[in-house]
């Protein structure tokens, strides 16, 4: 394993570095694939742990025991009801809202904190829109490390409490996520702390590949024809692609074409806008959307995410806040899965893609549900009933109510 | 116009480890050019051949991304603080 600059190709040893000293390009982890082809097999994966660590040889952790709180190998559910509603016969949902801290972020954090501990760091930190915050705090608790979490003011209560409970030092910053991120980059430069999504980013980002590995394995070692991925910083989307490419490289799946579609909220759609305008560069925006977990106006991986979307023949879709809320309800009522606003963005985008005919009715589609609905209850205010009939604890009281309901239903 | 520039870790080898440097310049471009005169090599890491900023470099003036201002032409006043920040950082 080594690090290589994605932009200029310069190589670096496996150290806590994240950008190339010469061109500022991102550093990526590279593996010895020829060796993995010889020494690793699907059978070995299948008999491994029911967690993301079943794919350990393709994760950049070089120690003995990773910091694992039980992340990954989440359900891939066939969604017949939602599929019927959208005109899709082979729709699957990868439900990552059931990870230990209720979002896909546990995948990236588990890798990064494990390697950070090995590098000798004692303090971990992150800049976060909420999901990462909870995950870093939880893993730091498990690893017995000190933890500084920086979040923008005004995050949802569920995300803040779901972070505070693990006992990190939680700091709110007056500004949006992009301000928090810039501040944390500067802090990471001054203190010898492991900011997992900054100076440990090459390790962190690799964790997202396990979503792609699991999807392919759960589809019987085949690639789906479409994947719908929400875009915040854009890293997840590029790593889903890298994960599929690696499985092809190992010869574990057939090299069949797939399209990766990127979903953003209209109030923060820098990547989708560049896609629609045919531009190569992503210009930053100031976010204004209820999908706070995706509210990154200056996505670090925007440029690469855009390239993956174009290369695979995918589309960029931006949806309104109203569509997001509607999609959260639709997913809950058809499939029994309660997702946060980011999942609402994904389902709303899926709905558009199906409606426009970008996804054929027979094609195999996977939508990534990246976070849990309890994190963003605020988004649902006024859209689900909050007052209900109240009765005395007598059978008669219920019978009267039930008969009245029945009469109303008939009328 | 004297302004302060905060130097990111990947460039500190060139600045002899200095994390903050004072330079002269009426615009962001001029300030970065004077930084390159003080510490040769900074320029080629920050600028592309055509004089524009590299894709993976962001510059902030008093905590504001210059892409929301006038880019490299953003004018500076005495005491302004510039930050050179790697773009490939952060997640969510």
Image (cartoon, rainbow, N blue to C red):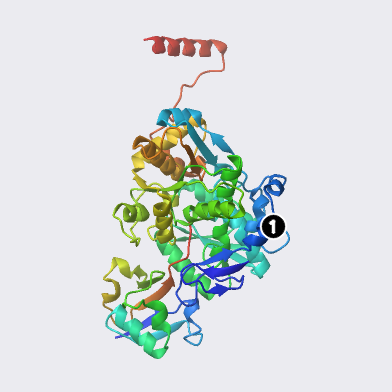
**Residue shown at the point (27%, 83%) measured from the top left:** B26
Expressed as whole percent of the image width and height from the top left, the position of residue A242 reads 53, 55
Q: Does residue A202 appear to the left or right of B71 in the view shown?
A: right
Q: Is A385 drawn above or below residue A368 in the view shown?
A: above
Which of the 4 quarters of the picture holds residue B27? Answer: bottom left
Q: Is A198 drawn above or below residue A50 in the view shown?
A: below
Q: Nearer the viewer, residue A99 or A360?
A: A360
**Residue shown at the point (33%, 83%) measured from the top left:** B31
Expressed as whole percent of the image width and height from the top left, the position of residue A67 reads 67, 57
Q: Is residue A260 visible?
A: yes
- Chain ID at mark 1: A
Expressed as whole percent of the image width and height from the top left, the position of residue A395 reads 56, 12
Q: Nearer the viewer, residue A328 or B22?
A: A328
Which of the 4 quarters of the picture holds residue B43? Answer: bottom left
Secondary structure under tag 1 reads helix
Q: Is residue A177 visible?
A: no
Q: Residues within 10 Å of mark 1 (few under 14, many from 20)?
A: few
Q: How many marks?
A: 1
Q: Is A229 drawn above or below residue B23 in the view shown?
A: above
Expressed as whole percent of the image width and height from the top left, the position of residue A107 reads 59, 52
The C terminus of chain A lies in which quarter of the figure?
top left
Q: Nearer the viewer, residue B91 or A376?
A: B91
Q: Nearer the viewer, residue B56 or B19?
A: B56
Q: Is A64 drawn above or below residue A269 in the view shown?
A: below
Which residue is label 1 attached to? Answer: A38
Q: Does residue A198 appear to the left or right of A118 in the view shown?
A: left
The N terminus of chain A lies in which quarter of the figure?
bottom right
Q: Does residue A73 appear to the left or right of B42 in the view shown?
A: right
């Amino acid at each position: 394993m080594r690090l290589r600059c994605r932009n200029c190709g310069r190589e670096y040893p496996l150290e806590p570095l994240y950008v190339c000293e010469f061109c500022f390009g991102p550093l990526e982890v590279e593996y010895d694939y020829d060796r993995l082809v010889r020494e690793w097999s699907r059978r070995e994966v299948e008999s491994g742990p029911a967690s993301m660590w079943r794919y350990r040889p393709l994760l950049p952790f070089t120690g003995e025991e990773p910091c694992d709180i039980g992340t990954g190998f989440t359900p891939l559910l066939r969604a017949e009801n939602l599929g019927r509603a959208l005109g899709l016969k082979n729709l699957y949902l990868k439900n990552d809202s059931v990870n230990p801290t209720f979002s896909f972020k546990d995948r990236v954090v588990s890798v990064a904190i494990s390697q950070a501990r090995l590098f000798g760091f004692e303090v971990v930190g992150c800049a976060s829109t909420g999901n990462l915050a909870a995950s870093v705090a939880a893993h730091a608790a498990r690893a017995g490390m000190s933890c500084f979490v920086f979040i923008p003011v005004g995050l949802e209560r569920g995300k803040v409490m779901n972070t505070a409970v693990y006992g990190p030092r939680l700091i709110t910053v007056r500004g949006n996520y992009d301000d928090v991120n810039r501040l944390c980059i500067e802090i990471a430069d001054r203190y010898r702390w492991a900011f997992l999504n900054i100076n440990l980013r090459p390790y962190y980002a690799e964790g997202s590949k396990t979503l792609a590995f699991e999807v392919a394995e759960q589809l019987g070692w085949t690639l789906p024809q479409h994947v719908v991925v929400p875009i915040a910083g854009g890293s997840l989307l590029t790593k889903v692609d890298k994960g599929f490419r690696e499985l092809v490289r190992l010869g574990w799946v057939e090299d069949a074409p797939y399209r990766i579609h990127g979903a953003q909220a209209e109030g923060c759609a820098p990547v989708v806008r560049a896609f629609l305008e045919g531009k190569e560069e992503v210009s930053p925006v100031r976010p204004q959307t209820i999908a706070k977990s995706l509210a990154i106006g200056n996505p670090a991986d925007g440029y690469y995410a855009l390239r993956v979307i174009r290369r695979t023949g995918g589309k960029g879709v931006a949806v309104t806040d109203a569509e997001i809320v509607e999609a959260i309800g639709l997913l809950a009522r058809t499939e029994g899965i309660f997702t946060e606003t980011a999942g609402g963005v994904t389902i709303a985008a899926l709905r558009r893609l199906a409606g426009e005919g970008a996804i054929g009715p027979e094609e195999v589609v996977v939508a990534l549900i990246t976070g849990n609905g309890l994190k963003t209850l605020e988004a649902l205010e006024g859209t689900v009933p909050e007052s209900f009939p109240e009765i005395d604890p007598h059978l008669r009281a219920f019978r009267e109510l039930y008969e009245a309901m029945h009469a109303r239903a008939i009328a | 116009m004297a302004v302060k520039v905060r130097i990111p870790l990947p460039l500190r080898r060139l600045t002899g480890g200095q994390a903050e440097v004072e330079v002269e310049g009426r615009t962001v471009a001029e300030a970065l050019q004077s930084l390159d005169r003080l510490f040769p090599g900074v320029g080629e890491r920050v600028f592309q051949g055509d004089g524009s900023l590299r894709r993976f470099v962001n510059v902030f003036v008093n905590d504001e991304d210059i892409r929301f201002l006038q880019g490299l032409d953003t004018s500076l006043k005495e005491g302004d603080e510039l930050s050179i920040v790697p773009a490939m950082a952060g997640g969510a």
